[in-house]
């Protein structure tokens, strides 16, 4: 199988290296069983020459202009960059990806690599996921994509996408199982210490809203929510002194932040509750009040809708239990 990893500008090194490591390890296990390598790995980039770290410079390199067809193409995650500018820098890959797909290639993106697939138009009408904190931006930029925000892995007509970071391992396992069988996929999971039963990435989300826009009214409400969210019981309280109609302001708020004011307030409250569960020993009732809720049933329901798990399960997973290092 001809497997290529495209070296976009601003790719995340960890994302790219993990793809190499998993599939080279799969080849090694196959050789140990007396079989041939199944995956022939090639980097595909833009520049005629590409200098790679010593640990991976043994892997062949080709440009996207070379007349070569691949069976499986990975788009690694992007680093913490301006995605708009980065997509423009990598625009030359878009017709190449479309041509490869039309000729039968399977495409797979890791984390924010989904933005490049979406920019190609190949995700229009298809299911896709990305890093849970980037899903709202992906939906705003590419409304024709069927975003599965909490999904760890999606598959739709020969295109695979994965959530953030370690979710990419679940995508690789799915492809290994498809091409090489479950036994090899399980062995790889054990070697890389991957829990195979993860079906939701919502609990990895972190709400840190941006204020990088020029709408002063929206920023005023953002600041009010940030400072007074425990006391704000409805969005009407937050926008009571805003000189704009509710309908117009909701439109402006969503345009600036990617969220409706109600959703923004809810995510702010739930994020506060998550931090208290992670870092304090406060009881659940006290945490509910600190987050600005006064009905336990409603709080539990909203918490689970936002994180995919109950408050207790979230504390069990993320509460700090390590002994301090002295």
Image (cartoon, helix red, strand yellow):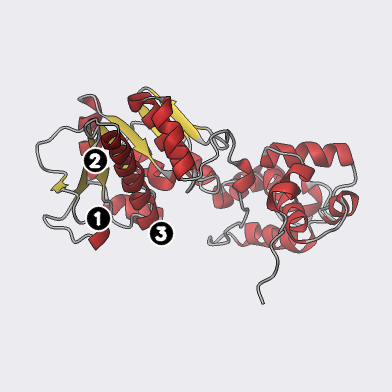
Image point (38%, 24%), residue name: 181
Camera-side residue of 264 and 132: 132
Q: In which quarter of the image is residue 320?
A: bottom right
Relative image position of residue 95 (x, y in whole percent)? 22, 37
Residue ID for mark 1? 56
Image point (19%, 61%), residue name: 51
Image point (16%, 48%), residue name: 60
Relative image position of residue 55 (x, y in whole percent)? 26, 59
Secondary structure of the residue carrying numbered label 3: loop
Q: Which mark is residue 81?
A: 3
- The quadrant the C terminus occupies is bottom right
Mark 2 or 3, closer to the camera: 2
Secondary structure of the residue carrying numbered label 2: strand
Residue ID for mark 2? 4
From the viewer's perspective, tell me whether residue 117 is left or right of residue 299.
left
| Dot 1 and dot 2 residues touching (CB under 8 Å) | no
């Amino acid at each position: 199988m001809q497997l290529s990893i495209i070296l976009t500008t601003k790719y995340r090194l960890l994302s790219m290296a993990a793809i190499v490591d998993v599939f080279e390890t799969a080849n090694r296990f196959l050789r140990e069983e007396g079989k041939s390598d199944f995956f022939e790995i090639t980097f595909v980039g833009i520049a005629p020459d590409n200098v790679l770290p010593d640990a991976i410079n043994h892997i062949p390199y080709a440009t996207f202009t070379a007349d070569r067809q691949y069976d499986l193409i990975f788009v690694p995650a992007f680093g913490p960059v301006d995605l708009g500018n980065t997509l423009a820098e990598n625009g030359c890959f878009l017709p190449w990806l479309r041509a490869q797909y039309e000729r039968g290639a399977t495409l797979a993106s890791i984390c924010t690599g989904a933005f490049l697939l979406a920019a190609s138009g190949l995700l229009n009408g298809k299911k896709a996921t990305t890093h849970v904190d980037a899903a709202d931006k992906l939906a705003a930029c590419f409304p024709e994509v069927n975003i599965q925000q909490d999904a760890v892995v999606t598959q739709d007509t020969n295109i695979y996408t994965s959530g953030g970071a370690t979710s990419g391992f679940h995508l690789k396992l799915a492809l290994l199982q498809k091409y090489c069988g479950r036994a090899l996929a399980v062995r790889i999971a054990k070697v890389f210490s991957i829990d195979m039963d993860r079906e939701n990435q919502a609990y990895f989300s972190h709400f840190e809203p941006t204020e990088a826009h020029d709408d002063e009214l929206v920023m005023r409400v953002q600041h009010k929510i940030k400072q007074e969210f425990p006391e704000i019981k409805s969005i009407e309280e937050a926008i009571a002194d805003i000189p704009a109609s509710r309908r117009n302001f909701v439109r402006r708020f969503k345009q600036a932040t990617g969220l409706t004011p109600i959703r923004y307030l809810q995510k702010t409250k739930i994020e506060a509750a998550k931090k208290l569960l992670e870092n304090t020993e406060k009881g659940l009732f006290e945490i509910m009040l600190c987050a600005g809720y006064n009905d336990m049933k409603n709080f539990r329901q909203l918490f689970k809708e936002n994180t995919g798990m109950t408050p207790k399960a979230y504390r069990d997973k993320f509460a700090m239990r390590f002994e301090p290092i002295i």
